[in-house]
Amino acid sequence: RQPEVRTVAGAEEKVKGNGRGQRGEYLTTATGTRLYETDHSLTAGERGPTLLQDHHLREKITHFDHERIPERVVHARGAAAHGTFLANGAAESICKAAMFASGARTPVFVRFSTVLGSRGSADTVRDTRGFATKFYTDEGVFDLVGNNIPVFFIQDGIKFPDIIHAAKPHPDREIPQAQSAHDTFWDFVSLHTEATAHTLWNMSDRGIPRSYRMMEGFGIHTFRLVNPDGETNLVKFHWKPAAGVHSLVWEEAQIAGGVDPDFHRRDLADAIEAGAYPSWDLGVQVFPDTEDEMFEGIDLLDPTKIVPEEIAPVQIIGTMTLDANPTNFFAETEQVAFHPGHLVPGIDITNDSLLQARLFSYLDTQITRLGGPNFDQIPINRPHVPVNDMLRDGFHQDGVHTGVAPYHPNSLDGGCPFLASAESAAYIEVPEEVSGRKVRQAPATFDDHFSQARLFYRSLSPIEQEHVAGAYTFELGKCFEENIKIRNLEILANIDPVLAKTVARGLGLEVPEPTEPLEDSEPSPALSQVGA
Ligand code: HEM
């Protein structure tokens, strides 16, 4: 019987799939045999039971039963787009990566996300946003897995499960989706005061961006770049949106979240479809690679600290433009796997202990999320250069490897892959001296938890400061435990007396005294990366 519904005219041109999904004119089983019927199960008589022998029924239902994969343990809700990164050559003197050579064009895939909500949650909640970029470079994949807030909640990755347990929906009722009404979140940040600066950024307008197209992005950690002469510099990466930085106000976020929970996802896809391609400049702050890894008194290994742009300007090294929506959400946006350890020659990590924990965590979680160790073979994750590894077998192995000797060197396979020179390979760790007794303790330079929160707060305009006070009052007002509110007010007292007083009054509580002296300084000049 001829299929009644034929391919919609013109649909072929629009489909950018890899041809493996749907080919041929006829509806088939997964093994390619043509079907004449797909709407009725095979039954013993019209009113009889369904027969076990109906393979098409069982294949169809079984495959459907297994359609879902686990959502990401964090950043489950996201939207993505394809584009290109164009280098302007300004990084050539500090980094030998080919992607930074003047005029080099590198295909990219970028996924934006919220951190805490589940896959189906609303876009406009108050939360940090992920900003993860996969560069398919001529030297392999480089992933810059950042956020839209330049500081992080915690200094050591060993606390990551704790902050996420505290911030995810409560285990009993599975509410809320974000930070509102959240005793555990506010309990955590009041007991781990290193989270103060990030919490303040979250309570500012930065926590409710207007659009993914209007967010900055930050690599947060300090990275080490190596130039062609083997010289090193420490850097922090920044994305600067051409559309500027814009936020919603709280009431807008509430309305948008109710009327259109897909607000950001739709905005990104619509803009790209309409040809209004979003773009960002990529910049670096550059610091000398000194033995103490400090810059102007700021510990560069502390991910809860920024380096103000006034003392280390952001130097633009290229521009990224997103110009194509994904063809298939699951195949691309859901299956993409970013990893801070995906590095190319010239870009190296540092000893930031948050980053070190991430290097372990992403690969580990992706083995579960993407069903085994071969997810690098999924089309969206494949590098755009040849792969010649000695990894074999495993679930979902797509390669049909030839030869008998998957080890290096070997003398059997008629020629072993070459090894690159040390100068042209990735993972040539800079040979730094490391020494010291094994300890479970942060350096003393990590102890300052409030000065940068003050710096940020003072850089905001009066209306932005008002929004911060309103956000704290609203969020803390939803906490049930009074002692949690009081501990958070004590933290606010260490940031700014007016802020502490405004929120305390809003909550109907006493205004606490600061526990450390507030510098008696004028409000800082607006930092260009804050309150812009
Ligand atoms: C996912 C950023 C710290 C564990 C993500 C994603 C982003 C991100 C953007 C989503 C990637 C995507 O779109 O697929 C960051 C930043 C951090 C940070 C900027 C700190 C500077 C950590 C730490 C850990 C961690 C400390 C664990 C020790 C994870 C895990 C995922 C994830 C398990 C899910 C990955 C997946 O399923 O593919 N992170 N993260 N992150 N992050 Fe982080």
Image (spheres, helix red, strand yellow):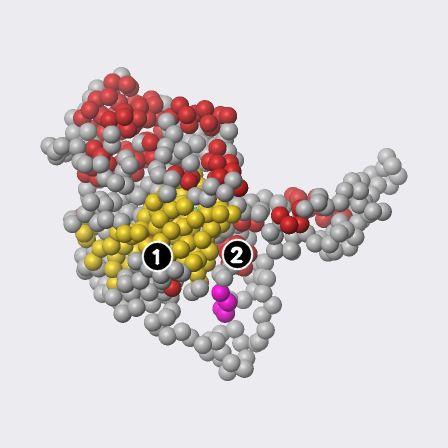
Question: Mark 2 Cα within 10 Å, few/some/many (few <14, many 20+)?
Answer: many
Which structural element holds mark 2? helix
Looking at the image, tell me whether mark 1 or mark 2 is earlier in sequence order.
1
In the image, residue 529 sits, relative to residue 314, either above or below, namely: above
Q: Mark 1 points at which residue?
A: 88
Number of labels in the image equals 2
Circle 1 crowding by C-alpha within 10 Å: few under 14, some 14–19, many from 20: some
Whole-Å distance between the Cαs marked 1 and 2? 33 Å
> Which span is picked out in magenta?
385-390
Above or below, comparing residue 302 to residue 246 in the picture: below
Quarter of the figure with residue 184: top left
| Quarter placement of the C terminus | top left
Where does residue 393 sit, x and y in percent of width and height? 56, 64
Which of the 4 image quarters holds residue 523? Answer: top left
Callout 1 amino acid: Asn
The residue labelled by disc 2 is: 375
